């Protein structure tokens, strides 16, 4: 196998990464012993998927978002390989290698397994697609974006500071948006005249921007991580092909 060979072909859509294996480099092993080929090809696919899953989850900057305080959203659950539900719910990310078993008990089983061999990784909803590629989302009601403010939503902020007041005002800079100011009572700038008391004035401090559009930046790097591991997969593929050939030369491949 040369360094230019590409062992895996990845296709898919905005939810799914589907992968098939290019078996041309090991056709001789497949022809003489499908059971040997099935074992090592399956192991190579499983390792490729596991490497991607582990490296992706450990990468800095990977963000899934957190469960909403009101329970309206759910935390993303990334399942282990072949352990995810058959029908994923919205918070599930599922990995599957086909066929499920690495070893086969007969030549016919090995041949059937080689015909369907591959893997896929997918989510039960479009949540990951939005975080993967980024997207401008329109929401039915105003969403509050905090401006250097904690807590991050107006209701929680007013609950923490019951003696403070927020003032609503349509935005003058952008249509379809509004703002919430904190009304602060402070002394007027400058020193009062002799004999006068310091005048108290109201000042406005921007706390929240209210918008119907949310700009989601790409943060997950799911597909990008797959591309970054290409050279490692090439090395693993050369090793798998070498082991297949070595196993074939040890003796009668039917004993495998």
Image: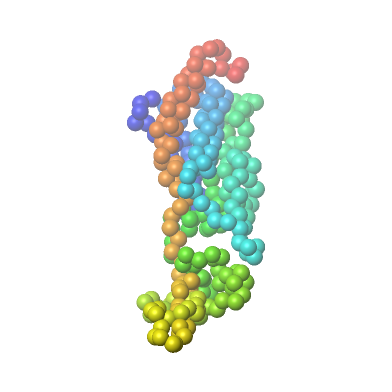
- Image quadrant holding the N terminus, namely top left
Residue 134 lies in quadrant: bottom left
| Residue ID at (47%, 45%) | 60
Q: Is residue 195 left or right of residue 77?
A: left
- Image quadrant holding the C terminus, namely top right
Find residue 66 and report its horizontal and vertical position in percent: 58, 56
> In this orientation, which residue lies closer to the viewer: 171 or 216?
171
| Residue ID at (64%, 42%) | 83
Residue 69 lies in quadrant: bottom right
Vertical order, 214 against 90 (above or below) = below
Vertical order, 64 against 82 (above or below) = below
Q: Is residue 13 left or right of residue 255?
A: left
Find residue 48 and report its horizontal and vertical position in percent: 50, 35
Vertical order, 135 against 169 (above or below) = above
Q: Can residue 158 be seen in this view?
A: yes
Find residue 231 and report its horizontal and vertical position in percent: 40, 33
Residue 116 lies in quadrant: top right
Find residue 72 and report its horizontal and vertical position in percent: 63, 64
| Residue ID at (55%, 78%) | 165
> In this orientation, which residue lies closer to the viewer: 186 or 245?
186
| Residue ID at (62%, 33%) | 101
Q: Is residue 194 left or right of residue 15?
A: left
Rendering colour mode:
rainbow
């Amino acid at each position: 196998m040369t360094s230019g060979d590409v062992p895996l072909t990845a296709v898919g859509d905005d939810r799914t990464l589907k992968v098939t294996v290019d078996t041309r480099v090991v056709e001789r092993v497949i022809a003489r012993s499908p059971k040997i080929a099935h074992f090592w090809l399956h192991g190579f696919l499983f390792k490729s998927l596991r490497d991607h899953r582990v490296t992706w989850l450990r990468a800095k900057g990977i963000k899934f978002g957190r469960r909403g305080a009101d329970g309206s959203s759910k935390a993303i659950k990334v399942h282990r390989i072949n352990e995810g539900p058959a029908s994923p719910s919205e918070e599930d990310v599922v990995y599957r290698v086909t066929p499920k078993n690495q070893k086969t008990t007969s030549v016919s089983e090995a041949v059937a397994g080689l015909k369907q061999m591959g893997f896929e990784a997918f989510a039960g909803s479009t949540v990951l697609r939005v975080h993967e590629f980024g997207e401008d989302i329109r929401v039915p009601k105003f969403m509050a974006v905090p401006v250097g403010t904690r807590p991050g939503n107006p209701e929680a902020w007013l609950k923490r500071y019951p003696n403070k007041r927020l003032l609503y005002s349509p935005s003058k800079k952008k249509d379809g948006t509004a703002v919430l100011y904190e009304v602060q009572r402070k002394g007027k700038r400058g020193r009062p005249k002799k004999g006068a008391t310091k005048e108290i004035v109201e000042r406005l401090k921007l706390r929240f921007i209210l918008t119907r559009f949310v700009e989601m930046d790409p943060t997950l790097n799911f597909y990008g991580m797959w591309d970054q591991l290409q050279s490692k997969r090439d090395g693993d593929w050369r090793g798998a092909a070498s082991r297949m050939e070595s196993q074939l030369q040890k003796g009668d491949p039917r004993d495998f």
